[in-house]
Amino acid sequence: MNINMVLAICAALIITLAAPVTAWAQGKAAGKAFDAMARQPQISNDLRALLVLSLAFMEALCIFGLLIAFMLLSKIA
Amino acid sequence: MFSTEPIFSIGILEVHGNTLTTWFLMIALTILCLYLTRGLSVMPTTKRQVALELAVEKLLHFLTPFMGKRELAEQYFPVIGSFFFIILAGNYSGLLPGAGRVAGFQAPTGTLSYCIGLALFSMIYAEYSGFKRKGIHYLKHVVSPNPVMLPMNLMELGIKPLSLSLRLFGNIYGEEILVAGIFSLFPAVVPVPFMFLSMFFGLIQAAVFTILSATYVASAVGAE
Protein backbone atom coordinates (compact mmCIF):
# COMPACT_ATOMS: atom_id res chain seq x y z
CA MET A 1 0.00 0.00 0.00
CA ASN A 2 2.53 2.59 -1.08
CA ILE A 3 1.77 6.20 -1.84
CA ASN A 4 1.37 5.68 -5.61
CA MET A 5 -1.56 3.34 -5.09
CA VAL A 6 -3.24 5.80 -2.78
CA LEU A 7 -2.72 8.66 -5.24
CA ALA A 8 -4.12 6.68 -8.15
CA ILE A 9 -7.15 5.49 -6.22
CA CYS A 10 -7.86 9.01 -4.94
CA ALA A 11 -7.55 10.51 -8.40
CA ALA A 12 -10.06 8.01 -9.76
CA LEU A 13 -12.37 8.46 -6.77
CA ILE A 14 -12.63 12.22 -7.31
CA ILE A 15 -14.20 11.87 -10.72
CA THR A 16 -16.28 8.88 -9.67
CA LEU A 17 -17.87 10.98 -6.96
CA ALA A 18 -18.10 14.29 -8.80
CA ALA A 19 -19.40 13.32 -12.21
CA PRO A 20 -22.72 11.60 -11.35
CA VAL A 21 -23.78 14.37 -8.97
CA THR A 22 -22.96 17.00 -11.59
CA ALA A 23 -24.80 15.06 -14.27
CA TRP A 24 -27.89 14.68 -12.07
CA ALA A 25 -27.98 18.35 -11.18
CA GLN A 26 -27.47 19.47 -14.77
CA GLY A 27 -30.14 17.06 -15.96
CA LYS A 28 -32.57 18.45 -13.41
CA ALA A 29 -31.86 22.03 -14.52
CA ALA A 30 -32.21 21.13 -18.19
CA GLY A 31 -35.46 19.27 -17.54
CA LYS A 32 -37.02 22.24 -15.79
CA ALA A 33 -35.83 24.54 -18.56
CA PHE A 34 -37.40 22.34 -21.21
CA ASP A 35 -40.66 22.24 -19.25
CA ALA A 36 -40.73 26.02 -19.14
CA MET A 37 -39.84 26.29 -22.83
CA ALA A 38 -42.69 23.95 -23.70
CA ARG A 39 -45.08 25.97 -21.59
CA GLN A 40 -44.06 29.36 -23.07
CA PRO A 41 -42.24 29.01 -26.38
CA GLN A 42 -41.93 32.76 -26.90
CA ILE A 43 -39.32 33.22 -24.15
CA SER A 44 -37.28 30.20 -25.14
CA ASN A 45 -34.35 32.37 -26.29
CA ASP A 46 -33.90 33.92 -22.83
CA LEU A 47 -34.35 30.55 -21.22
CA ARG A 48 -31.72 29.03 -23.48
CA ALA A 49 -29.12 31.63 -22.45
CA LEU A 50 -29.90 31.15 -18.77
CA LEU A 51 -29.79 27.38 -19.13
CA VAL A 52 -26.35 27.49 -20.73
CA LEU A 53 -25.11 29.82 -18.01
CA SER A 54 -26.37 27.52 -15.24
CA LEU A 55 -24.88 24.46 -16.91
CA ALA A 56 -21.51 26.22 -17.13
CA PHE A 57 -21.56 26.92 -13.40
CA MET A 58 -22.27 23.32 -12.49
CA GLU A 59 -19.72 22.10 -15.00
CA ALA A 60 -17.11 24.33 -13.40
CA LEU A 61 -17.50 22.59 -10.06
CA CYS A 62 -16.86 19.23 -11.69
CA ILE A 63 -13.86 20.71 -13.49
CA PHE A 64 -12.39 21.86 -10.18
CA GLY A 65 -12.38 18.18 -9.14
CA LEU A 66 -10.80 17.23 -12.46
CA LEU A 67 -7.98 19.70 -11.85
CA ILE A 68 -7.29 18.17 -8.45
CA ALA A 69 -7.23 14.73 -10.09
CA PHE A 70 -4.69 15.98 -12.65
CA MET A 71 -2.52 17.38 -9.89
CA LEU A 72 -2.65 14.09 -8.04
CA LEU A 73 -1.84 12.10 -11.18
CA SER A 74 1.19 14.23 -11.86
CA LYS A 75 2.57 13.34 -8.44
CA ILE A 76 2.68 9.63 -9.18
CA ALA A 77 6.34 8.73 -9.40
CA MET B 1 3.15 17.27 -22.09
CA PHE B 2 3.56 20.79 -23.41
CA SER B 3 6.97 22.38 -23.29
CA THR B 4 7.49 24.77 -20.44
CA GLU B 5 10.90 26.17 -21.23
CA PRO B 6 10.98 29.88 -21.90
CA ILE B 7 11.42 30.98 -25.48
CA PHE B 8 13.60 33.94 -24.57
CA SER B 9 14.15 36.20 -21.62
CA ILE B 10 13.85 39.94 -21.29
CA GLY B 11 16.04 40.76 -18.32
CA ILE B 12 14.75 38.58 -15.53
CA LEU B 13 11.28 38.02 -17.08
CA GLU B 14 10.91 34.81 -19.04
CA VAL B 15 8.70 34.75 -22.11
CA HIS B 16 6.92 31.45 -22.62
CA GLY B 17 4.82 30.18 -25.48
CA ASN B 18 1.55 31.47 -24.08
CA THR B 19 2.89 35.02 -23.85
CA LEU B 20 4.07 34.94 -27.45
CA THR B 21 0.67 33.69 -28.55
CA THR B 22 -1.03 36.40 -26.50
CA TRP B 23 1.05 39.09 -28.21
CA PHE B 24 0.23 37.61 -31.58
CA LEU B 25 -3.49 37.52 -30.75
CA MET B 26 -3.38 41.12 -29.51
CA ILE B 27 -1.75 42.29 -32.72
CA ALA B 28 -4.19 40.27 -34.83
CA LEU B 29 -7.25 41.63 -32.99
CA THR B 30 -5.96 45.20 -33.15
CA ILE B 31 -5.36 44.95 -36.89
CA LEU B 32 -8.84 43.43 -37.32
CA CYS B 33 -10.44 46.24 -35.34
CA LEU B 34 -8.53 48.91 -37.24
CA TYR B 35 -9.64 47.37 -40.52
CA LEU B 36 -13.25 47.10 -39.44
CA THR B 37 -13.54 50.66 -38.17
CA ARG B 38 -12.06 52.45 -41.16
CA GLY B 39 -14.37 54.88 -42.88
CA LEU B 40 -17.37 54.69 -40.58
CA SER B 41 -20.36 56.88 -41.39
CA VAL B 42 -23.48 57.73 -39.43
CA MET B 43 -25.72 55.85 -41.86
CA PRO B 44 -23.91 52.59 -42.61
CA THR B 45 -23.15 52.10 -46.27
CA THR B 46 -20.64 49.26 -46.29
CA LYS B 47 -21.36 45.65 -45.39
CA ARG B 48 -18.39 45.77 -43.03
CA GLN B 49 -19.98 48.47 -40.91
CA VAL B 50 -23.35 46.72 -40.85
CA ALA B 51 -21.72 43.48 -39.67
CA LEU B 52 -19.73 45.34 -37.01
CA GLU B 53 -22.80 47.19 -35.74
CA LEU B 54 -24.71 43.90 -35.65
CA ALA B 55 -22.00 42.23 -33.58
CA VAL B 56 -21.75 45.11 -31.11
CA GLU B 57 -25.53 45.40 -30.84
CA LYS B 58 -25.95 41.68 -30.19
CA LEU B 59 -23.27 41.71 -27.50
CA LEU B 60 -24.78 44.76 -25.81
CA HIS B 61 -28.25 43.19 -25.95
CA PHE B 62 -26.79 40.05 -24.44
CA LEU B 63 -25.07 41.88 -21.58
CA THR B 64 -27.88 44.27 -20.67
CA PRO B 65 -29.90 41.87 -18.47
CA PHE B 66 -26.83 41.14 -16.37
CA MET B 67 -25.88 44.75 -15.86
CA GLY B 68 -29.38 46.05 -15.28
CA LYS B 69 -29.67 49.04 -17.54
CA ARG B 70 -28.56 49.66 -21.09
CA GLU B 71 -26.55 52.76 -20.13
CA LEU B 72 -24.45 50.76 -17.69
CA ALA B 73 -23.79 48.12 -20.32
CA GLU B 74 -22.70 50.79 -22.80
CA GLN B 75 -20.47 52.51 -20.25
CA TYR B 76 -18.55 49.41 -19.28
CA PHE B 77 -18.68 47.74 -22.67
CA PRO B 78 -15.07 48.55 -23.74
CA VAL B 79 -13.51 46.43 -21.02
CA ILE B 80 -16.14 43.72 -20.80
CA GLY B 81 -16.47 43.31 -24.54
CA SER B 82 -12.69 43.08 -24.80
CA PHE B 83 -12.75 40.28 -22.21
CA PHE B 84 -15.10 38.35 -24.45
CA PHE B 85 -13.08 38.70 -27.62
CA ILE B 86 -9.65 38.10 -26.16
CA ILE B 87 -10.80 35.03 -24.26
CA LEU B 88 -12.61 33.70 -27.32
CA ALA B 89 -9.51 34.22 -29.45
CA GLY B 90 -7.33 32.61 -26.79
CA ASN B 91 -9.60 29.58 -26.51
CA TYR B 92 -9.78 29.03 -30.26
CA SER B 93 -6.06 29.50 -30.79
CA GLY B 94 -5.53 26.13 -29.16
CA LEU B 95 -7.40 24.46 -31.99
CA LEU B 96 -5.25 25.78 -34.80
CA PRO B 97 -2.78 23.31 -36.30
CA GLY B 98 0.53 23.46 -34.55
CA ALA B 99 -0.73 24.67 -31.18
CA GLY B 100 1.30 23.05 -28.44
CA ARG B 101 3.70 21.38 -30.87
CA VAL B 102 5.40 24.35 -32.45
CA ALA B 103 7.60 26.07 -29.89
CA GLY B 104 6.10 29.40 -28.98
CA PHE B 105 2.50 28.68 -29.96
CA GLN B 106 0.28 27.65 -27.10
CA ALA B 107 -3.26 28.55 -26.20
CA PRO B 108 -2.87 31.27 -23.56
CA THR B 109 -6.03 30.40 -21.66
CA GLY B 110 -4.69 26.88 -21.16
CA THR B 111 -2.09 28.20 -18.74
CA LEU B 112 -2.97 29.03 -15.17
CA SER B 113 -0.93 32.23 -14.97
CA TYR B 114 -2.81 33.88 -17.82
CA CYS B 115 -6.20 32.95 -16.36
CA ILE B 116 -5.24 34.25 -12.93
CA GLY B 117 -4.09 37.48 -14.53
CA LEU B 118 -7.41 37.89 -16.35
CA ALA B 119 -9.45 37.14 -13.24
CA LEU B 120 -7.41 39.50 -11.07
CA PHE B 121 -7.81 42.24 -13.64
CA SER B 122 -11.55 41.64 -13.74
CA MET B 123 -11.78 41.86 -9.95
CA ILE B 124 -9.60 44.98 -9.78
CA TYR B 125 -11.65 46.60 -12.53
CA ALA B 126 -14.87 45.91 -10.62
CA GLU B 127 -13.47 47.46 -7.44
CA TYR B 128 -12.07 50.40 -9.39
CA SER B 129 -15.46 51.02 -11.00
CA GLY B 130 -17.08 50.92 -7.59
CA PHE B 131 -14.63 53.43 -6.20
CA LYS B 132 -14.94 55.69 -9.20
CA ARG B 133 -18.72 55.70 -9.01
CA LYS B 134 -19.24 56.02 -5.29
CA GLY B 135 -16.01 57.45 -3.91
CA ILE B 136 -14.96 56.31 -0.48
CA HIS B 137 -18.49 55.20 0.42
CA TYR B 138 -17.86 52.11 -1.68
CA LEU B 139 -16.08 50.62 1.32
CA LYS B 140 -19.47 50.27 3.00
CA HIS B 141 -20.26 47.33 0.75
CA VAL B 142 -18.30 44.95 2.96
CA VAL B 143 -20.82 45.49 5.75
CA SER B 144 -23.93 45.50 3.58
CA PRO B 145 -26.64 44.36 3.99
CA ASN B 146 -25.73 43.40 7.56
CA PRO B 147 -22.43 43.62 9.52
CA VAL B 148 -22.71 39.89 10.16
CA MET B 149 -21.81 39.39 6.50
CA LEU B 150 -18.34 40.87 6.94
CA PRO B 151 -16.38 37.55 6.85
CA MET B 152 -18.39 36.36 3.86
CA ASN B 153 -17.81 39.56 1.93
CA LEU B 154 -14.11 39.52 2.70
CA MET B 155 -13.85 35.90 1.64
CA GLU B 156 -15.59 36.74 -1.61
CA LEU B 157 -12.74 39.11 -2.45
CA GLY B 158 -10.50 36.09 -2.65
CA ILE B 159 -12.95 33.47 -3.88
CA LYS B 160 -14.26 35.38 -6.87
CA PRO B 161 -10.97 35.68 -8.80
CA LEU B 162 -10.04 32.11 -7.83
CA SER B 163 -13.23 30.55 -9.12
CA LEU B 164 -13.25 32.76 -12.21
CA SER B 165 -9.71 31.80 -13.18
CA LEU B 166 -9.99 28.13 -12.33
CA ARG B 167 -13.23 27.73 -14.24
CA LEU B 168 -11.66 29.10 -17.43
CA PHE B 169 -8.33 27.33 -16.97
CA GLY B 170 -9.89 23.99 -16.03
CA ASN B 171 -12.21 23.92 -19.01
CA ILE B 172 -9.60 24.83 -21.61
CA TYR B 173 -6.75 22.79 -20.13
CA GLY B 174 -9.04 19.80 -19.63
CA GLU B 175 -10.13 19.96 -23.26
CA GLU B 176 -6.49 20.16 -24.34
CA ILE B 177 -5.59 17.08 -22.30
CA LEU B 178 -8.64 15.24 -23.61
CA VAL B 179 -7.90 15.99 -27.26
CA ALA B 180 -4.21 15.13 -26.75
CA GLY B 181 -5.14 11.83 -25.12
CA ILE B 182 -7.59 10.90 -27.86
CA PHE B 183 -5.03 11.96 -30.45
CA SER B 184 -2.45 9.62 -28.99
CA LEU B 185 -4.89 6.73 -29.34
CA PHE B 186 -6.54 7.51 -32.69
CA PRO B 187 -4.42 9.89 -34.78
CA ALA B 188 -7.05 10.11 -37.53
CA VAL B 189 -10.70 11.15 -37.70
CA VAL B 190 -11.75 10.44 -34.11
CA PRO B 191 -10.41 13.65 -32.44
CA VAL B 192 -12.65 15.82 -34.64
CA PRO B 193 -15.87 15.56 -32.55
CA PHE B 194 -13.84 16.35 -29.45
CA MET B 195 -12.42 19.42 -31.13
CA PHE B 196 -15.97 20.53 -31.95
CA LEU B 197 -16.77 20.04 -28.27
CA SER B 198 -13.72 22.12 -27.45
CA MET B 199 -14.96 24.89 -29.74
CA PHE B 200 -18.38 24.84 -28.10
CA PHE B 201 -16.98 24.94 -24.59
CA GLY B 202 -14.51 27.66 -25.54
CA LEU B 203 -17.39 29.89 -26.61
CA ILE B 204 -19.39 29.04 -23.49
CA GLN B 205 -16.51 29.77 -21.15
CA ALA B 206 -15.75 33.10 -22.81
CA ALA B 207 -19.42 34.03 -22.41
CA VAL B 208 -19.49 32.90 -18.77
CA PHE B 209 -16.37 34.90 -17.92
CA THR B 210 -17.89 37.98 -19.55
CA ILE B 211 -21.21 37.51 -17.78
CA LEU B 212 -19.56 37.11 -14.40
CA SER B 213 -17.31 40.13 -14.92
CA ALA B 214 -20.36 42.16 -15.91
CA THR B 215 -22.20 40.92 -12.81
CA TYR B 216 -19.32 41.86 -10.52
CA VAL B 217 -19.05 45.33 -12.05
CA ALA B 218 -22.82 45.81 -11.84
CA SER B 219 -22.96 44.74 -8.20
CA ALA B 220 -20.08 47.08 -7.37
CA VAL B 221 -21.59 50.02 -9.22
CA GLY B 222 -25.28 49.56 -8.56
CA ALA B 223 -27.16 48.88 -5.36
CA GLU B 224 -27.12 52.42 -4.12
Image (spheres, grey):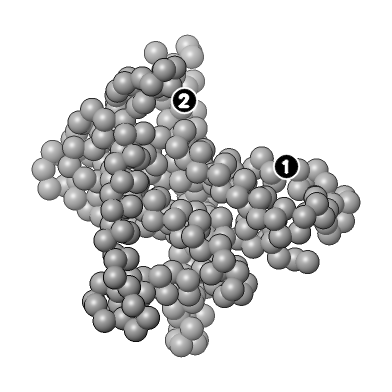
Asked whether A34 or A50 is in front, the reply is A50
SS label for mark 1: helix
Can residue B168 be seen here? The reply is yes
Asked whether A47 or B31 is in front, the reply is B31
- Rendering coords of residue A68 (x, y %): 49, 32
Relative placement, left or right, of B131 versus B185 is right
Q: Chain of mark 2?
A: A
SS label for mark 2: helix
Mark 1 lies on residue: B155
Can residue A55 be seen here? The reply is no
Relative vertical location of residue B52 with respect to residue B198 in this rendering, above or below: below
Asked whether B165 or A72 is in front, the reply is B165
- Rendering coords of residue B71 (x, y %): 59, 73
Q: Quadrant of the N terminus of chain B?
A: top left
Relative placement, left or right, of A21 versus B194 is right
Mark 1 Cα within 10 Å, few/some/many (few <14, many 20+)?
few
Relative placement, left or right, of B70 versus B5 is right
Relative vertical location of residue B224 with respect to residue B47 in this rendering, above or below: above
- Rendering coords of residue A40 (x, y %): 49, 87
Residue at image coords 72%, 42%: B155
Looking at the rendered structure, which numbered label has been put on residue A47? none
Q: Quadrant of the C terminus of chain B?
A: bottom right
The amino acid type, in three-letter code, at marker 1 is Met
Residues behind callouts 1 and 2 on a single chain: no
Relative placement, left or right, of B5 versus B169 is left
Mark 2 lies on residue: A72
Find residue B42 and report its image quarter: bottom left
The amino acid type, in three-letter code, at marker 2 is Leu
Mark 2 Cα within 10 Å, few/some/many (few <14, many 20+)?
some
